[in-house]
Amino acid sequence: MLGDARPVGKGRPRAGEMHGVDAAPGRPQPAGGADDAALAGHPASARAAGGRPLPPELRPFVGHLTRHALDAAATRARRIGVGADEVLVAQGAIEGEAATRRLAAHLGLPVAVLGPQDAPADAAMAAAVIRTGVLLESAGGGGRPAFTMAARGREVRRLFRALRADAGLARRARLVAPAALRRHVLATTGKALAERAVAALAAADPLKSAATLRPARTLAAIGLCAGLPLAGLLALAPDAGVLAVQALLSLLFLSWIALRIAGSLFLPPDDERPSLRERDLPVYSILVPLYREAASVPGLVASLSGLDYPALGSKRTTNDGVCIGWDALGFVVPCNRVHHMAADPQVLTTLRRKRDTIEAYIGTMERQIADARRDLSAINATIRLYEIDPTTPGVVAPYAEIHRLFRRGEMTETCRQALRQRGPLDTRELALEVIRTKGMDESDRILRKTIALRIVQALRLQERRGGGISGDGRRCGVRLWTVPQPLGA
């Protein structure tokens, strides 16, 4: 693109090309050379992990993205054969529009705002713009043309070299985001592109296009060729015509059976396997989720170790165990040491989002389970109320409601008088005194328990308030209550 005739990937670029600095003295440098020179003066900033220099398309993002993100993007770009800035955009580390603005600022080029005047001339030009990402603007008066480019990936490297080779190209070039250029072309020439996609093959080679077929005409020709002789035969000799039709159908049926038998006996030759270099093979990520399956790990790792596939990722064997990795993901057998491997940021981001979603779902389910348990407890208690049989001992509720049977302070005063008359009494004895005073049934065990509980609550409140009642002692495991005698009594 733009005057670069050397194929990508053949030969190693010079150091000056990788850092954006012209190696030969006296040659002009495009805008952004100062940044390139700064990078060249700081090798640590211009080199990725392992001592490799950062690709040219990542230089605009130095200082704006983390070193780890840039190194991971460069590593993944080398593995899958795309530009490192394309990896950043695909991972969501930076938006496509923002990446274009960073590149334009680094190169000193303007960012194009496309309008109706930038529409391609025809559908063929629109298809070429979408395919190449370059919108050619012809200059009147024999001047040199201008370009609006959606440079991304390896096209950025070609743009770097083209700017070094042509000092005036910076005044005739604009940058635009690939998505924005595609939207503009489809909005201005989308109808023409659709018509070209439909009618281009029929116009270029009608014999290869289904649009030239006329089913009605073909069926009419077949009907005339076969129907007229058959109709004449049936009209002149009906019996012979019927026999002829049966013989023709039988022949077609037998021919079809013979074709199927021959096809079942025919063994097609083996297709020749395509020869591909290891670097051209696709990269696969193998994820093996395990949960409480430690017994199956040794066999699983042995099977993974036996995969006959080029080790494009990390594959190594240690003294403590076998660590196998494809595309920066590892599989480890139980050993004394865990091997940490550089993970792909996109994979980690996806896994973390899935983890957060599952944790939120678990929290929601736990809250719903807690609500359901409370509802179940309330329903069970209500059912027991309806199933109570007063005649069955031990089935009724352990306490009865006696709130409205006593006036305010009546129970406390009754207990105080009993203590003054009879001396120290425990809670059970006080409960019987209260029941006798109110004329209630002394044999009602539930009533005795309920009144005893209310006595404990009332007398402990009086004790804390200094009401002249003490419950410090115990008798047979039951609290013993007393009324202290006044001094001099």
Image (tube, rainbow, N blue to C red):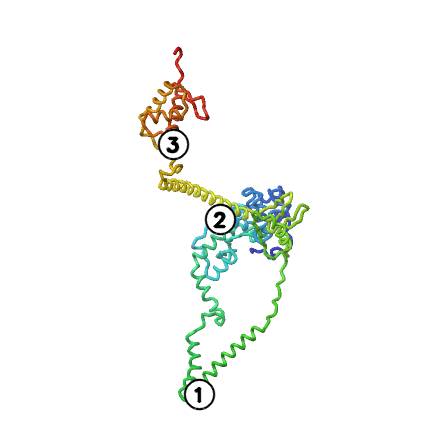
- Residue type beneath disc 3: Arg
Of residues 53 and 394, the one nearer the viewer is 394
Q: Nearer the viewer, residue 68 or 477?
A: 477
The secondary structure type at the circle numbered 1 is helix
Q: Is residue 7 left or right of residue 110?
A: right
Q: Which residue is mark 3?
A: 445
Which of pointers 2 and 3 lies earlier in the amino acid sequence? 2
- Most extreme residue toward the top is 488
Vertical side of 255 occupied by 366: above or below: above
Give the residue number, with chain letter if any, for mark 1. 240
**Dividing the picture into quarters, in which one does residue 419 lie?**
top left
| The label number, if any, that marks residue 97 in the structure image | 2
Please tell me how crowded label 2 is: few (under 14), some (14-19), or many (20+) other residues with Cα within 10 Å.
some
The image shows a total of numbered marks equal to 3
Q: Nearer the viewer, mark 2 or mark 3?
A: 3
Q: Residue at x 43, y 53 (%)?
A: 115
* Left-right relation of 391 to 77: left
**Mark 1 belongs to which amino acid?**
Ala
55 displayed left or right of 433: right
Of the 4 image quadrants, the one containing the C terminus is top left
Q: Secondary structure at mark 3?
A: helix
Q: Nearer the viewer, mark 1 or mark 2?
A: 1
